[in-house]
Image (tube, rainbow, N blue to C red):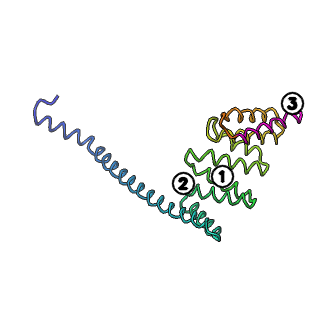
Amino acid sequence: MADTEEEQIELLKKWWHENGKAIVIGVVSAIVLFAGWQTWHSHQKTKNEAAADIFQQMITTTESPDGAAKAAELAEQLRKDYSSTVYAVFAALQLAKDAVAVNDLPRAAMLLDWAQGQHPDASLKPLIGFRLAKVQYAQGELDKALASLSGIKDGSAWSVTAAELRGDILQAQNKQDEARESYNAALKALDASGDQEQRANLEIKLSGLVKSGAQP
């Protein structure tokens, strides 16, 4: 322990000599990181606002009689220049829907796969996975379709439709028992106030399995 003021000063000098540089570097680094974060945050905000404007133009153009080509151009601009924003994902979903409408399934699959690869918000993942699975099923890519459905958790808003589609895919693979399990899971997930048309459709599909003598 330092007994005199001179000794205390000498100890302080020694401590500063050994640690002062590290402290200064730490403080400067913190300032630089904070300034960088502020700059990045401001840039992201500006980028999101620009993407929102383009997306609004795309929606407005879509509603006009001759705006399909321009809307597609704006959607591609969002995908190319604003891929980190949610608006680019929405644009890809719209482009994929348009591609399905003209039976361009490879393009629809590419767009949905791209949207999935952008790490979208958790609320969008089941929607993208379901639509991608539907396109892959229509293309006859049954294993890929099942893989796309695997990310949709039981109990989610998409669990019923996903279970039904999974049943369709398994039936197409001639896995009748597994298809039956999926249809039953979809029925079980439908509550009493659920879609009665969907319930009836599921029951018809189950009945078809029984009638086809699908017991192994």
Above or below: residue 67 compared with residue 133: below
Q: Could you give the CA–CA distance between mark 3 and mark 2, rounded to whole angstroms?
A: 46 Å
Reading the image, the residue beneath label 3 is 215
Quarter of the image that includes the C terminus = top right
- Residue 86 is tagged as 2
Q: Could you give the CA–CA distance between mark 3 and mark 1, rounded to whole angstroms?
A: 36 Å
Q: Secondary structure at mark 2?
A: helix
Q: Earlier in the sequence, mark 2 or mark 1?
A: 2
Residue 158 position, x and y percent, is 64, 41
Residue pictured at 73% horizontal, 40% vertical: 164
Reading the image, the residue beneath label 1 is 113
Location of residue 163 by image quarter: top right
Amino acid type, callout 1: Asp
Magenta stretch in the rendered image: 196-216
Residue pictured at 24% horizontal, 42% vertical: 17
Q: Earlier in the sequence, mark 3 or mark 2?
A: 2
Above or below: residue 67 compared with residue 203: below
Residue pictured at 59% horizontal, 67% vertical: 61
Amino acid type, callout 2: Val
Along the viewing direction, whichever of 128 and 40 lies nearer the viewer: 128
- The 10 Å Cα crowd at callout 1, few under 14, some 14 to 19, many 20 or more, is some
Along the viewing direction, whichever of 150 and 66 lies nearer the viewer: 66
Judge from the rendering whether residue 29 lies leftward or rightward of residue 129; answer left or right: left
Amino acid type, callout 3: Gln
Q: Earlier in the sequence, mark 3 or mark 1?
A: 1
Residue 215: in magenta span: yes
Along the viewing direction, whichever of 37 and 177 lies nearer the viewer: 177
Along the viewing direction, whichever of 10 and 152 lies nearer the viewer: 152
